[in-house]
Amino acid sequence: MDTTAILQRSNVTISGLTDPGAPTIVFLHGLGADQSSWRLLAPAFEANYRVVLLDLIGAGNSSPEAYDYARHGSLHGHADDLLDVLRALAATDVVFVGHSISSIIGVLAAVREPARFGRLVLLAPSPRFVNEGGYAGGFAKKDIEELLTAMEQNYEGWIGGVAPLMMGSSNTALIAELSNSFMRTNPTIAQHFARTTFLSDHRADLPLLTTPTLILQCAHDVIAPLAVGTYLHEHLPDSQLVVIDTPGHCAHLTAPSQTLEEMDDFLHYVPCCAGMVGQPL
């Protein structure tokens, strides 16, 4: 597949600096959303970065015919899509910003091709949503199966229940925005991707990541509770954990100013020699 086709397939849009050698920051949305969900964050980086937005295959204005139920039945398929875009852009040492399950897609891609990534920002990430043994993912397996069954039986009704839960806010405009985004997605694809999302387990991949990582966890998130952020921080070798005091699962929409502040601190922080405290630029 040629470069143009790859970029069209993922509905890639580019703003900010136009020089191909400019620092690149890439944003990838979570379940039910599309690249427009970054509207409060991405413009802030246009003065200093080549800003790349894309849609997960099957979401937004990506090519729906490119969704492959075998390839995209695993998060590795979506990581391959992300790497295809970075290769097409000849992008290396990028800052990757992922929300929710796309955080883990970014982790898998960075483990596969670490030279493509300079830093990762993981917003409300979760490597495993199911409680298992001593691991607290947030949901019993039975609850996940009930959630997925409800989604398959009454997609519109399911959206009406899950959108306020994910937004965690009484902001009706934000709830409507997320609901409308879900409604624009092909229900069959959305259901398949939700099953892939909620039943995936990528805890074993975490120690393989060598890229410096910022974990931004929402303080009142029932989708990815605080215990998940702590688990990630303990298992990602080079990570920082910051808790943002906001409800729900979408701090980039409910607390954009604080999210930007924490990202800016992380991206302007250079670690010193081993064993010493880092110094901000």
Image (tube, grey):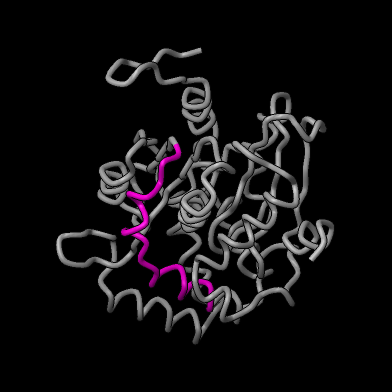
Q: Residue at x 47, y 58 (%)?
A: 101
Q: Is residue 14 above or below residue 130?
A: above
SS majority, magenta: helix
Residue at the farthest left position: 134
Q: Is residue 53 above or below residue 183?
A: above
Q: Residue at x 60, y 36 (%)?
A: 93
The number of discs equals 0
Residue at the farthest bottom position: 153
Q: Residue at x 37, y 56 (%)?
A: 205
Residue 208 lies, in percent from the top left, at 37, 50
As for residue 196 lying within the magenta part, the answer is yes
Q: Is residue 230 left or right of residue 218?
A: left
Residue 27 lies, in percent from the top left, at 62, 45
Q: Nearer the viewer, residue 33 or 89?
A: 89
Residue 198 lies, in percent from the top left, at 40, 69
Quadrant that contains the N terminus: bottom right
Residue 223 lies, in percent from the top left, at 37, 58
As for residue 127 lying within the magenta part, the answer is no
Q: Residue 66: which quarter of the image?
A: bottom right
Q: Nearer the viewer, residue 127 or 89?
A: 89
**Magenta part of the protein: which range?**
192-211
